[in-house]
Amino acid sequence: MLAQAARIAQKRLPVLLQGETGTGKDVVANAIHEASSVAAGPFVAVNCAALPRELIAGELFGHAEGAFTGARRGGAKGRFEEANGGTIFLDEIGDMPLDLQPYLLRVLEEGTSSRLGESIQRRINVRVIAATNRPLDDDVAQGRFRSDLFYRLDGISLYLPPLRERSADIPWLVRSMLRTLTPAAETPPEVSPDLLEVLCEHDWPGNVRELRNVLSRILALSSDKLLDAHALQGGLRSHHPVRRQETERYELRNLRDNERKLILDAVAATGGSATDAARAIGISRATIYRRLRSYRAAHEDT
């Protein structure tokens, strides 16, 4: 998969990444950018499904001053302008409203963009990578997605299988994620062969998202510069399929265990941010830090 991404990076055609949720389409998009001729430029990611419908156009293309109520004074750049000279990653492209798709098509075909409320055409030179977890060809057949936009985005199509089917990618993914999860001023820890072996053998029902959360939990609990299999502390789910209700149920013995799992899950879900985790579960950041220190101390004593 990564070898394919490296080859694709040398082409300037648009790329369409397809695969089920959590397979790491954002990671592959970033890898393509970093291996491409525009790696020195910006990498701008836009989740089309996360933006309110009325904000998508302004977010993508920017707006002039006074274009609408609440428009920023002096206007604002859109994501395409921000990505100029680099790569724009349009995640969940299948959720883009049908009536906005012609505007995106025009930007892709003409290489220019105009902000909402003005007629100036600005030249845009960006590498476009789009991603979807749904079959866009079916959406085209049912009239939910424009065929001309689909074929414009589908310069090179890459399907990302579930992580359980590409365990060879796991060592690279682990090291790449540890670099992003570790504070910029610190050196990412090394990973022992025994830990990599365990991670490669796991079936990863949650795909790359589950792997990222497991690594976040390991970092929250360990202060070691070498991570080994002991750092997992039973943090992987069973390889056997279970019902959704069972995977979401806390099967811990007492209140303290429940608190520990709640805090570690919150820290993992927020990418290791104690501030965001504290806000998410309604406790103070100082409490988060105290608990993490106590968990590390307990782990080091075992």
Image (spheres, rainbow, N blue to C red):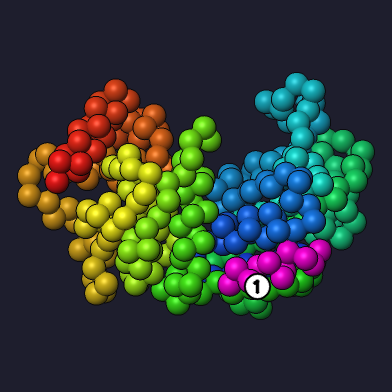
Magenta region, residue range: 1-13
Task: Label 1, secondary structure: give it.
Answer: helix
Residue that extends furthest to the left in the rendered view of this protein? 254
Residue at horizontal 72 percent and vertical 70 percent from the top? 7
Left/right of residue 234 with respect to residue 2 in the rendered view: left
Residue at horizontal 82 percent and vertical 47 percent from the top? 85
Residue 197 versus residue 17: which sits nearer the camera? 197
- Residue 95, located in which quarter of the rendered image? bottom right
Left/right of residue 122 with respect to residue 222 in the rendered view: right
Q: Which residue is mark 1?
A: 4
Q: Is residue 55 magenta?
A: no
Residue 103 versus residue 188: which sits nearer the camera? 188
Q: Position of residue 152 (x, y in %)?
A: 79, 68
Residue at horizontal 42 percent and vertical 46 percent from the top? 189
Residue 124 at least partly seen: yes
- Residue 293, located in which quarter of the rendered image? top left
Q: Main secondary structure of the magenta part?
A: helix
Left/right of residue 286 with respect to residue 191 in the rendered view: left
Residue 44 versus residue 106: which sits nearer the camera? 44
